[in-house]
Image (cartoon, rainbow, N blue to C red):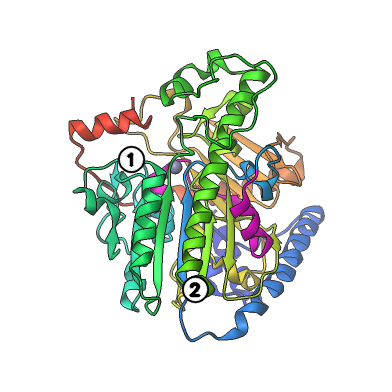
Amino acid sequence: MQSDESSARTACRAASGTPARYCRPYFEYIMICKCDALCKTLRNATMAAISLGLLLVLPGCGGESRPPHIFVISIDTLRADALVPYGETSVETPTASALAADGILFTRAVTPMGITIPVHATMLTGLMPRHHGVRANVHRLAEDVPAIVEKLDAIGYNSASILSLGAMNFIAGLDRGFDFASDRAEDGREFKRDDAETLDMALDWIGEQDGDTPLFMLLHFYDVHSPHLPTDYTPPMPDGYDGPLVDGISVETLYNESQDLLAGRPDELAALRALFVGEAAEADRRAGRFIEALRDQGLLENSVVIYLADHGQGLGENDYFGHGPTLEQTVLQVPIIIRDFRRPGEARQVTETVGLIDVAPTVLGLAGLDADSLPGRNLLALGETETPSVYISEVEQRSSQTEFRPEHFDDEALAAFFDNYKYVESDGQQRLYRIDETWGQDIQPIELDELHESLRIWLADLMQDYREGNTSSERAELDDEAIEQLRSLGYIQ
Ligand SMILES: [Zn+2]
């Protein structure tokens, strides 16, 4: 196997103009094709990537001397398909629609894990959970893992981490490098606050800025996360619906009773989705108010907004509800929309598979910083790649706090996304799926003929390489109060 890996890397490096960093294990390989049909698929995908890349690179030739303000708006738990640009029709999501109408919509984006804090650690370090060490919500980022905010700080950025889930900063240590982190204002003891309050804090911080100093902000909203409750934007429930979801559904009910209350019941599932998209529409408008504040402050014309979610949410597909130690497509697929307000608006869709691991190199690239040491890619410079990429998703690491869902728990389980394929190893099973053309939730297992068996073996080898990588993690000290509050959020039981 090692020789195959070396051959793949050698072939990758030999490809004209392919930087060596794209040849590292886990993410990019030139596949040594032995099957014509599969090679054709690869060639087509490669040409599509190159075409898109040319389109994407051209606007980057302006040579601005002033680094942009960069705002990452992370809407927790927001499924891609709850947004109008990704197909939602029962509500309006005007912010996502406006950003997509004048920006770049990534239609095939995946998260490295279906859990909040490890994913945000990935966005802030550019490393996969297994490599930055935050593999569960109770882990803390080790001091020797570099954070991109430290690099931004070194070139003069003023930065803020304003989050609705305070645990990310003061338990996980993701505030490292930020000039302002909101939990400090609450003496470091707040776990969660309403998004309205978080938005106010972000607006206050923006209002204090002079506009001359480049800004970086991670703005995190949490209200889309369960419990799922009615909002001003909740669409009508099914006609005559008078079931248990009329007034919403709690975290505990969603995780503990959904199988009995909701699974396989169309009216209940429709009611659950109505609640969810109503929350999505509300969060989207909050993001819009933040962007309007940037405009009012005179900051927007030199800003780049990255609108995304850390993971999705199971709403009953495959009888799965919520998110957590799972590789369900409803959880792993996320929205990413990027709007560079320095440039004329132009809608583009990127259908190449990308991931949240690409956020860090994208941010560094926007700031004019080198990101060659990171495994991800600059989403605004995808033309540098010559092959479709493999993106891996992993599962939360089992811990004493997370063993409450053992039926889903195989912390060596992995998924690999490659073009329209998804390969999953979990619970001793190996399954290769094809994802439909729209990259929606309809994924079908594939009969392993000779062609697909070669693809499966290749992906399985990549996965094994990934598992064998070095990791470091540091457990946070959790007191009883912290455990109780995590429990109230549904993270532990
Ligand atoms: Zn989350």
Which of these two is toward me, 286 or 222? 286
Magenta part of the chain:
92-119
Q: How many marks?
A: 2
Q: Which residue type does callout 1 highlight? A: Lys
Q: Which residue type does callout 2 highlight? A: Gly
Please determine whether, in this image, residue 334 is positioned above or below residue 444: below
Q: Depth-wise, is mark 1 or mark 2 nearer the camera?
A: 1
Which of these two is toward me, 25 or 280? 280
Is 385 colored magenta in this rendering?
no
Q: Going 32% across and 48% down the picture, which residue do you hit?
A: 168
Q: Secondary structure at mark 2?
A: helix
Q: Which residue is mark 2?
A: 365
Residue 412 shows in this picture: yes
Q: Secondary structure at mark 1?
A: loop
Q: Indicate left or right for 447 with 304 as reference.
A: right
Q: Which residue is mark 1?
A: 192
Q: Going 30% across and 44% down the picture, which residue do you hit?
A: 167
